[in-house]
Amino acid sequence: MKVTADTKVLIRAAVQDDLHQARRAAKILAEADLVAVPVPVLCEFVWVLRRGYRKSATDVSDAIRRLMRSPNVVMNRTAVEAGLSALDAGGDFADGVIAHEGEWLGAEEFVSFDSKAVSLLQAQGSRARLLS
């Protein structure tokens, strides 16, 4: 069986705050031949864990890396690594993903009104410009 995991499935498996759902999530994730994890799911996953559950960036990064090590999980690993790089540097996972995917689509520069995102991406060697 090949499945796409939504955000709530990953949250339940990671947080275990609803025992019944956590067991079902863990079972499907373990038994599936392939678990597709779309990048938007991981953006939501990070947001929910950071904002809703007040998890540290390190805890969230570790959870994503554990998921990436699962042999049956497939995802856009280069985009996820870009998101993790931003998160690990104190930024937003989604900003790293957005900058990466924009470049992959042919963009030459990331533009934003978010000075923190622009500074972080510039520090990582990306072309980024603050709009004001």
Image (cartoon, helix red, strand yellow):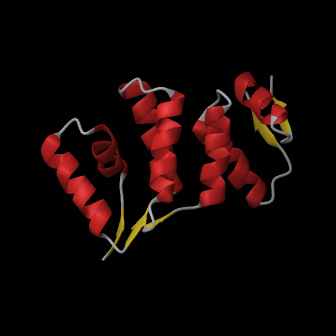
Residue depicted at x 40% and y 34%? 48
90 to 12, vertically: above or below: above
- Residue pushed farthest left? 20
Residue depicted at x 71% and y 51%? 100
- Residue 79 at x, y percent in the picture: 64, 54
- Residue 29 at x, y percent in the picture: 31, 61
In the rendered structure, the answer to whether residue 122 lies left or right of residue 23 reads right
Residue depicted at x 77% and y 35%? 121
Viewer-proximal residue among 120 and 108: 120
- Residue 25 at x, y percent in the picture: 25, 54
In the rendered structure, the answer to whether residue 38 lies left or right of residue 15 reads right
Q: Quadrant of the C terminus?
A: top right
Residue depicted at x 18% and y 39%? 18
In the rendered structure, the answer to whether residue 113 lies left or right of residue 12 reads right
Labels in figure, total: 0
Q: In the figure, residue 78 lies in which quadrant?
A: bottom right
- Residue 52 at x, y percent in the picture: 37, 27
In the rendered structure, the answer to whether residue 26 lies left or right of residue 66 reads left
Viewer-proximal residue among 28 and 118: 28
111 to 20, vertically: above or below: above
Q: Quadrant of the N terminus?
A: bottom left
Viewer-proximal residue among 13 and 104: 13
4 to 22, vertically: above or below: below
